[in-house]
Image (cartoon, helix red, strand yellow):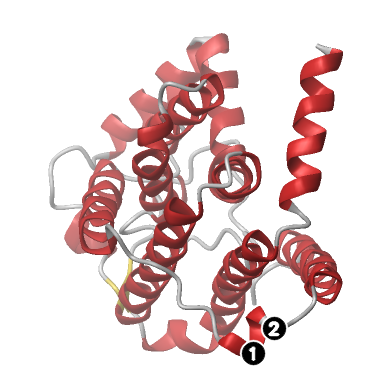
C-alpha cells in the first residue's frame, strides 16, 4: 500500500510539472467555471424560459403515484438508498473531478483529455441553450415529496432538469474512460458513472425522460468529438511551467470558492 501511494504521488508530481498537462487542466477548469457562471446568470434568463412541465406530465412514467412509489422503494432499502444518495452527490462535480484526475493527471492521456474538454464544452453549451428556451421542474419539486429542500441554490436549480446534465456528463465520462477499462480505477469510475442515471431517477431528482435524453445527448456529443485535439496557442506553450502552475493554483482556488458560494447561496 505504501509503495502504491508513493508511486501515485510520483506520477501526480510528474504530471503537475508537465506543461501539456497543466494547459489542459486549466482548460477543463475554465470550462467548469463557465458552467457555474451560467447557473448564476440564469437568474436573468429564467423569466424568458418557458415552463413545459405540464406537457411532460402527459407522458407515461410521470404520475405522482409512480414517482412516489419509486422514491419509497428506494428509501425502503437502506443500502440502496445510501448508495444512490452518495452516488448522486458525488455525481456531477465529483465525477468530473475524478475523471479529469485519472484521464489527465494519473494516466496522462492527452488525446482523451482533449476529447473530454470538447465534450464538456458541447454538453454545457447544448444544455445551457435548452434551459434558456424551456425548463422542466424536478419530480420532487412538482409533487412536494417530503425530505427535499425546495429552496435550492445556484448550483442545484430545479429548472436544470431536461435533459439531465448530470446524466450527460456521467455518460461522457463513462465513454471517455472506456478504453482504459482494463485498469482497476477505470472499472470503479465506470461503475460510478453507470449508477448516476439510476440515482437521479430513484431519488426523485429527475424524470425518466431527463435521464434518457441526457444519455442520448452524451452519445451524440461523443460521436462528433471523437479524435478532436486541443489547439494550444503558441504564446501559451512558450510560458514557463512555474507560471502555468501558479495560474493553475489560482484557478483551483477560484473554482473552489465559486463552487462553495454556489452551493450555499439560495437562488432569488
Q: Find disc 2 in the rendering and name its residue.
A: 238
Residue 237 percent coordinates (x, y) = 64, 79
- In this orientation, which residue lies closer to the viewer: 175 or 5? 5
In the image, is residue 152 above or below residue 203?
A: below
Q: How many tags in the picture?
A: 2
Q: For residue 85, which quarter of the picture?
A: top right
Report, in whole angstroms, how far the alpha carbon at label 2 lies from the one at label 1. 5 Å
- In this orientation, which residue lies closer to the viewer: 182 or 50? 182
- SS for tag 2? loop
Q: Find disc 1 in the rendering and name its residue.
A: 235
Residue 110 percent coordinates (x, y) = 50, 55
In the image, is residue 112 above or below residue 266?
A: above
Q: Residue at x 37, y 49 (%)?
A: 172
Callout 2 environment at 10 Å: few (<14), some (14 to 19), or many (20+)?
A: few
Q: Residue at x 53, y 89 (%)?
A: 44
Find out whether the residues at labels 2 and 1 contact each other: C-beta distance under 8 Å: yes
55 to the left or right of 246: left
Amino acid at each position: 500500500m505504501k509503495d502504491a501511494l508513493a508511486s501515485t504521488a510520483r506520477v501526480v508530481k510528474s504530471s503537475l510539472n508537465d506543461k501539456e498537462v497543466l494547459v489542459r487542466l486549466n482548460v477543463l477548469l475554465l470550462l467548469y467555471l463557465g458552467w457555474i457562471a451560467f447557473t448564476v446568470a440564469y437568474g436573468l434568463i429564467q423569466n424568458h424560459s418557458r415552463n413545459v412541465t405540464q406537457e411532460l406530465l402527459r407522458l407515461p412514467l410521470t404520475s405522482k403515484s409512480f414517482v412516489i412509489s419509486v422514491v419509497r422503494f428506494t428509501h425502503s432499502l437502506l443500502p440502496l438508498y445510501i448508495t444512490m444518495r452518495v452516488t448522486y452527490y458525488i455525481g456531477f462535480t465529483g465525477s468530473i473531478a475524478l475523471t479529469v484526475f485519472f484521464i489527465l493527471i494519473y494516466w496522462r492521456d492527452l488525446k482523451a483529455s482533449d476529447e473530454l474538454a470538447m465534450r464538456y464544452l458541447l454538453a454545457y453549451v447544448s444544455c445551457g441553450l435548452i434551459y434558456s428556451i424551456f425548463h422542466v421542474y424536478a419530480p420532487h419539486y412538482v409533487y412536494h415529496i417530503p425530505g427535499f429542500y425546495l429552496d435550492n441554490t445556484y448550483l442545484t436549480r430545479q429548472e436544470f432538469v431536461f435533459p439531465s446534465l448530470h446524466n450527460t456528463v456521467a455518460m461522457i465520462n463513462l465513454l471517455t474512460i472506456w478504453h482504459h477499462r482494463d485498469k482497476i480505477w477505470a472499472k470503479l469510475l465506470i461503475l460510478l458513472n453507470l449508477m448516476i442515471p439510476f440515482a437521479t431517477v430513484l431519488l426523485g431528482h429527475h424524470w425518466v425522460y431527463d435521464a434518457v435524453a441526457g444519455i442520448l445527448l452524451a452519445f451524440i456529443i461523443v460521436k462528433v468529438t471523437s479524435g478532436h485535439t486541443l489547439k494550444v496557442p503558441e504564446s501559451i506553450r512558450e510560458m514557463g511551467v512555474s507560471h502555468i502552475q501558479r495560474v493553475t493554483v489560482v484557478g483551483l482556488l477560484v473554482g473552489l470558492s465559486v463552487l462553495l458560494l454556489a452551493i450555499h447561496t439560495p437562488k432569488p
